Image (cartoon, rainbow, N blue to C red):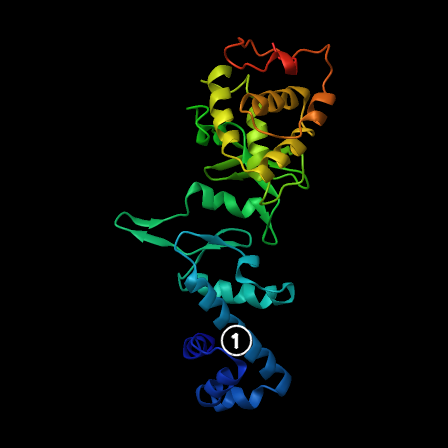
Amino acid sequence: MDIDLENAISDASSLKQVAFVLKYKMSSFLSRKLDNKDRNNYLCSMNLASQMRTRIKKLPEGKTFGYADLRLAKEQYQAAAKALERMQTKGLIKKISKGVFYKPEQSVFGELKPDYREQLRPYLFENGKRVAYETGYSLYNRMGLTTQIAYRIKIASRSKRISINRGSLKADAIKSYAEVNEANYELLGLLDAIKDIKNIPDCTVRKALKIVSYQISKLNEKQIADLVKYALLYPPRVRALVGALLESLNIQAKTEKLKQSLNPLTKVKLGLKKSDLQTTTDWYIA
Protein backbone atom coordinates (compact mmCIF):
# COMPACT_ATOMS: atom_id res chain seq x y z
CA MET A 1 0.00 0.00 0.00
CA ASP A 2 2.83 2.43 0.89
CA ILE A 3 4.59 1.95 -2.43
CA ASP A 4 1.45 2.46 -4.52
CA LEU A 5 0.56 5.51 -2.49
CA GLU A 6 4.04 7.00 -2.88
CA ASN A 7 3.81 6.68 -6.64
CA ALA A 8 0.35 8.22 -6.66
CA ILE A 9 1.50 11.34 -4.83
CA SER A 10 4.99 11.66 -6.30
CA ASP A 11 4.05 14.93 -7.98
CA ALA A 12 2.22 16.39 -4.98
CA SER A 13 3.84 19.55 -3.65
CA SER A 14 1.66 20.32 -0.59
CA LEU A 15 -0.21 18.59 2.20
CA LYS A 16 -3.48 19.71 0.63
CA GLN A 17 -2.65 17.92 -2.62
CA VAL A 18 -1.52 14.82 -0.77
CA ALA A 19 -4.74 14.77 1.23
CA PHE A 20 -6.73 14.97 -2.02
CA VAL A 21 -4.89 11.95 -3.40
CA LEU A 22 -5.35 10.06 -0.14
CA LYS A 23 -9.10 10.63 -0.26
CA TYR A 24 -9.36 8.60 -3.44
CA LYS A 25 -6.34 6.28 -3.20
CA MET A 26 -6.49 5.05 0.41
CA SER A 27 -8.48 1.94 1.05
CA SER A 28 -11.54 2.55 3.18
CA PHE A 29 -10.17 0.01 5.65
CA LEU A 30 -6.95 1.96 6.23
CA SER A 31 -8.86 5.23 6.35
CA ARG A 32 -11.08 3.94 9.17
CA LYS A 33 -8.10 2.58 11.11
CA LEU A 34 -6.09 5.79 11.14
CA ASP A 35 -7.07 8.34 13.71
CA ASN A 36 -6.44 12.02 13.08
CA LYS A 37 -2.97 12.04 14.64
CA ASP A 38 -1.78 9.03 12.69
CA ARG A 39 -3.24 10.43 9.51
CA ASN A 40 -1.43 13.75 9.97
CA ASN A 41 1.85 11.94 10.64
CA TYR A 42 1.29 9.82 7.57
CA LEU A 43 0.55 12.88 5.46
CA CYS A 44 3.73 14.61 6.68
CA SER A 45 5.81 11.51 6.01
CA MET A 46 4.46 11.11 2.48
CA ASN A 47 4.92 14.80 1.72
CA LEU A 48 8.52 14.68 3.01
CA ALA A 49 9.22 11.65 0.79
CA SER A 50 7.82 13.53 -2.20
CA GLN A 51 9.98 16.57 -1.48
CA MET A 52 13.07 14.38 -1.11
CA ARG A 53 12.44 12.62 -4.43
CA THR A 54 12.12 16.00 -6.14
CA ARG A 55 15.40 17.23 -4.67
CA ILE A 56 17.26 14.00 -5.43
CA LYS A 57 15.93 14.04 -8.99
CA LYS A 58 17.70 17.38 -9.53
CA LEU A 59 21.08 16.01 -8.38
CA PRO A 60 23.50 14.84 -11.09
CA GLU A 61 24.26 11.15 -11.38
CA GLY A 62 27.35 10.07 -9.48
CA LYS A 63 27.13 12.94 -6.97
CA THR A 64 27.16 11.97 -3.32
CA PHE A 65 24.69 13.54 -0.92
CA GLY A 66 23.57 13.37 2.69
CA TYR A 67 20.78 14.71 4.88
CA ALA A 68 22.23 18.24 4.89
CA ASP A 69 22.28 18.31 1.07
CA LEU A 70 18.54 17.54 1.05
CA ARG A 71 17.92 20.54 3.34
CA LEU A 72 16.36 18.41 6.07
CA ALA A 73 15.86 19.42 9.67
CA LYS A 74 17.23 17.01 12.28
CA GLU A 75 13.73 16.17 13.49
CA GLN A 76 12.99 14.89 9.95
CA TYR A 77 15.92 12.47 9.84
CA GLN A 78 14.00 9.45 11.13
CA ALA A 79 11.22 9.77 8.56
CA ALA A 80 13.79 10.62 5.88
CA ALA A 81 15.79 7.46 6.65
CA LYS A 82 12.74 5.31 5.92
CA ALA A 83 12.08 7.15 2.67
CA LEU A 84 15.72 6.74 1.61
CA GLU A 85 15.55 3.04 2.45
CA ARG A 86 12.56 2.66 0.12
CA MET A 87 14.43 4.50 -2.64
CA GLN A 88 17.37 2.13 -2.20
CA THR A 89 15.05 -0.86 -2.52
CA LYS A 90 13.77 0.55 -5.82
CA GLY A 91 17.33 1.11 -7.03
CA LEU A 92 16.86 4.87 -7.33
CA ILE A 93 19.82 5.57 -5.03
CA LYS A 94 22.73 3.62 -3.54
CA LYS A 95 24.33 3.89 -0.11
CA ILE A 96 28.06 4.54 0.02
CA SER A 97 28.50 4.89 3.79
CA LYS A 98 26.45 5.80 6.85
CA GLY A 99 24.23 8.74 5.92
CA VAL A 100 25.84 9.15 2.48
CA PHE A 101 24.12 8.17 -0.78
CA TYR A 102 24.45 8.68 -4.53
CA LYS A 103 22.43 8.35 -7.71
CA PRO A 104 23.94 5.47 -9.71
CA GLU A 105 25.29 6.42 -13.13
CA GLN A 106 24.82 3.98 -16.01
CA SER A 107 27.36 3.56 -18.78
CA VAL A 108 28.03 1.10 -21.59
CA PHE A 109 30.26 -0.73 -19.09
CA GLY A 110 27.53 -0.95 -16.47
CA GLU A 111 26.87 0.99 -13.32
CA LEU A 112 29.54 3.48 -12.24
CA LYS A 113 30.36 4.43 -8.67
CA PRO A 114 31.09 8.06 -7.76
CA ASP A 115 34.64 9.09 -8.60
CA TYR A 116 37.34 9.36 -5.95
CA ARG A 117 36.76 13.03 -5.13
CA GLU A 118 33.01 12.57 -4.80
CA GLN A 119 33.54 9.64 -2.43
CA LEU A 120 35.85 11.82 -0.37
CA ARG A 121 33.60 14.91 -0.32
CA PRO A 122 31.20 13.82 2.49
CA TYR A 123 34.13 13.42 4.89
CA LEU A 124 35.27 17.00 4.31
CA PHE A 125 31.97 18.61 5.28
CA GLU A 126 29.84 18.69 8.41
CA ASN A 127 26.28 20.05 8.32
CA GLY A 128 27.00 21.48 4.90
CA LYS A 129 30.14 23.36 6.01
CA ARG A 130 33.71 22.46 5.11
CA VAL A 131 35.74 21.29 8.12
CA ALA A 132 38.62 19.48 6.39
CA TYR A 133 40.69 19.31 3.21
CA GLU A 134 42.89 16.84 1.36
CA THR A 135 46.63 17.42 1.70
CA GLY A 136 49.91 15.55 1.32
CA TYR A 137 51.23 13.83 -1.82
CA SER A 138 47.81 13.44 -3.46
CA LEU A 139 47.30 17.22 -3.28
CA TYR A 140 50.87 17.92 -4.42
CA ASN A 141 50.29 15.62 -7.38
CA ARG A 142 47.32 17.73 -8.49
CA MET A 143 49.40 20.87 -8.01
CA GLY A 144 51.99 19.49 -10.43
CA LEU A 145 54.65 19.14 -7.75
CA THR A 146 55.06 15.37 -7.99
CA THR A 147 54.16 12.46 -10.24
CA GLN A 148 53.88 10.10 -7.29
CA ILE A 149 50.45 8.63 -6.59
CA ALA A 150 49.59 8.32 -2.90
CA TYR A 151 48.22 4.96 -1.74
CA ARG A 152 46.84 6.65 1.37
CA ILE A 153 45.82 10.27 1.36
CA LYS A 154 45.90 12.75 4.23
CA ILE A 155 42.94 14.72 5.52
CA ALA A 156 43.64 17.84 7.56
CA SER A 157 41.15 19.24 10.04
CA ARG A 158 41.43 21.36 13.14
CA SER A 159 38.28 20.23 14.90
CA LYS A 160 38.13 16.47 14.23
CA ARG A 161 40.18 13.42 13.27
CA ILE A 162 39.07 11.96 9.95
CA SER A 163 40.45 8.53 9.07
CA ILE A 164 39.02 6.40 6.26
CA ASN A 165 39.46 2.74 5.41
CA ARG A 166 36.67 1.95 2.97
CA GLY A 167 37.51 -0.06 -0.14
CA SER A 168 40.02 1.82 -2.26
CA LEU A 169 39.49 5.02 -0.26
CA LYS A 170 42.04 5.17 2.54
CA ALA A 171 43.05 8.27 4.47
CA ASP A 172 45.02 9.25 7.56
CA ALA A 173 44.07 12.18 9.78
CA ILE A 174 46.39 15.10 10.51
CA LYS A 175 45.74 18.32 12.36
CA SER A 176 45.52 21.51 10.32
CA TYR A 177 47.26 24.68 11.45
CA ALA A 178 44.01 26.69 11.31
CA GLU A 179 40.26 26.16 11.41
CA VAL A 180 39.23 25.02 7.94
CA ASN A 181 36.53 26.67 5.85
CA GLU A 182 35.57 27.02 2.20
CA ALA A 183 37.45 30.30 1.84
CA ASN A 184 40.83 29.17 3.21
CA TYR A 185 41.35 25.47 2.51
CA GLU A 186 43.21 26.06 -0.77
CA LEU A 187 45.54 28.55 0.91
CA LEU A 188 46.22 26.04 3.68
CA GLY A 189 47.04 23.40 1.06
CA LEU A 190 49.47 25.83 -0.58
CA LEU A 191 51.15 26.51 2.78
CA ASP A 192 51.35 22.73 3.39
CA ALA A 193 53.26 22.38 0.12
CA ILE A 194 55.67 25.13 1.19
CA LYS A 195 56.13 23.39 4.56
CA ASP A 196 56.99 20.09 2.85
CA ILE A 197 58.97 21.63 -0.02
CA LYS A 198 62.18 19.70 0.81
CA ASN A 199 60.42 16.35 1.06
CA ILE A 200 58.15 16.25 -2.00
CA PRO A 201 59.16 13.18 -4.04
CA ASP A 202 60.28 13.57 -7.67
CA CYS A 203 60.58 17.33 -7.26
CA THR A 204 63.55 19.59 -6.56
CA VAL A 205 63.19 22.59 -4.26
CA ARG A 206 63.99 24.85 -7.22
CA LYS A 207 61.19 23.37 -9.34
CA ALA A 208 58.73 23.45 -6.42
CA LEU A 209 59.50 27.14 -5.81
CA LYS A 210 58.63 27.98 -9.41
CA ILE A 211 55.29 26.20 -9.20
CA VAL A 212 54.41 27.65 -5.80
CA SER A 213 55.55 31.12 -6.87
CA TYR A 214 53.26 30.97 -9.91
CA GLN A 215 50.29 29.97 -7.78
CA ILE A 216 50.95 32.82 -5.34
CA SER A 217 51.12 35.27 -8.25
CA LYS A 218 47.54 34.39 -9.17
CA LEU A 219 46.13 35.29 -5.73
CA ASN A 220 44.12 38.47 -5.25
CA GLU A 221 44.83 41.10 -2.60
CA LYS A 222 42.48 39.55 -0.01
CA GLN A 223 43.96 36.09 -0.55
CA ILE A 224 47.52 37.46 -0.19
CA ALA A 225 46.57 39.05 3.15
CA ASP A 226 45.04 35.75 4.28
CA LEU A 227 48.11 33.82 3.11
CA VAL A 228 50.31 36.00 5.34
CA LYS A 229 47.87 35.64 8.25
CA TYR A 230 47.81 31.84 8.06
CA ALA A 231 51.57 31.58 7.38
CA LEU A 232 52.13 33.03 10.87
CA LEU A 233 50.61 29.81 12.25
CA TYR A 234 53.14 27.62 10.41
CA PRO A 235 56.80 26.76 11.23
CA PRO A 236 59.57 29.36 10.63
CA ARG A 237 60.60 27.89 7.25
CA VAL A 238 57.10 28.54 5.91
CA ARG A 239 57.03 32.11 7.21
CA ALA A 240 60.45 32.79 5.71
CA LEU A 241 59.59 31.33 2.31
CA VAL A 242 56.25 33.11 2.07
CA GLY A 243 57.94 36.44 2.82
CA ALA A 244 60.76 35.78 0.35
CA LEU A 245 58.38 34.70 -2.42
CA LEU A 246 56.10 37.69 -1.96
CA GLU A 247 59.05 40.08 -2.15
CA SER A 248 60.49 38.31 -5.19
CA LEU A 249 57.13 38.75 -6.93
CA ASN A 250 57.02 42.44 -5.97
CA ILE A 251 53.64 41.84 -4.34
CA GLN A 252 52.69 44.58 -1.92
CA ALA A 253 51.86 42.81 1.31
CA LYS A 254 52.24 43.48 5.01
CA THR A 255 55.04 41.02 5.72
CA GLU A 256 56.47 42.82 8.76
CA LYS A 257 54.96 40.32 11.18
CA LEU A 258 56.48 37.45 9.20
CA LYS A 259 59.93 39.05 9.41
CA GLN A 260 59.53 39.85 13.12
CA SER A 261 58.55 36.24 13.87
CA LEU A 262 61.88 34.91 12.57
CA ASN A 263 65.12 34.49 14.49
CA PRO A 264 67.95 36.19 12.50
CA LEU A 265 70.43 33.67 13.91
CA THR A 266 68.49 30.69 12.57
CA LYS A 267 68.89 29.88 8.88
CA VAL A 268 66.35 27.99 6.79
CA LYS A 269 68.52 25.55 4.86
CA LEU A 270 67.09 24.68 1.44
CA GLY A 271 70.28 24.46 -0.62
CA LEU A 272 69.23 27.35 -2.86
CA LYS A 273 71.40 29.59 -4.97
CA LYS A 274 70.90 33.33 -5.18
CA SER A 275 69.73 32.83 -8.76
CA ASP A 276 66.98 30.49 -7.56
CA LEU A 277 65.40 33.11 -5.30
CA GLN A 278 66.83 36.62 -5.17
CA THR A 279 65.37 37.48 -1.76
CA THR A 280 66.77 34.55 0.23
CA THR A 281 69.31 36.63 2.21
CA ASP A 282 66.70 39.06 3.50
CA TRP A 283 64.69 36.15 4.87
CA TYR A 284 67.51 34.10 6.41
CA ILE A 285 67.27 31.35 3.78
CA ALA A 286 70.38 29.46 2.68
Q: In which quarter of the view is residue 257 placed?
A: top right
Q: Position of residue 104 (x, y in %)?
A: 38, 54
Residue drawn at point x = 35 percent, y = 53 percent = 105
- Taking 189 as reference, is 56 above or below it? below
Which amino acid is tagged 1?
Asn
Mark 1: give few (<14), some (14-19) or many (20+) Cα within 10 Å.
many
Residue drawn at point x = 57 percent, y = 77 percent = 44
Give the total number of marks visible in the rendering.
1
Residue at image mark 1: 47
Residue 174 can be seen in this image: yes
Q: Position of residue 67 (x, y in %)?
A: 56, 59
- Taking 139 as reference, is 12 above or below it? below
- Is 61 on the left or on the right of 285, as rendered? left
Q: In which quarter of the view is residue 156 placed?
A: top right
What quarter of the picture does the N terminus occupy?
bottom left
What quarter of the picture does the C terminus occupy?
top right
Helix or strand or loop: what does disc 1 sit on? Answer: helix
- Taking 73 as reference, is 275 above or below it? above
Q: Position of residue 111 (x, y in %)?
A: 33, 51
Q: Nearer the viewer, residue 225 or 21?
A: 225
Residue drawn at point x = 47 percent, y = 39 percent = 167
Residue drawn at point x = 40 percent, y = 62 percent = 92
- Taking 268 as reference, is 160 above or below it? below
- Is 39 on the left or on the right of 27, as rendered? right
Q: Position of residue 35 (x, y in %)?
A: 62, 87
Residue 261 can be seen in this image: no
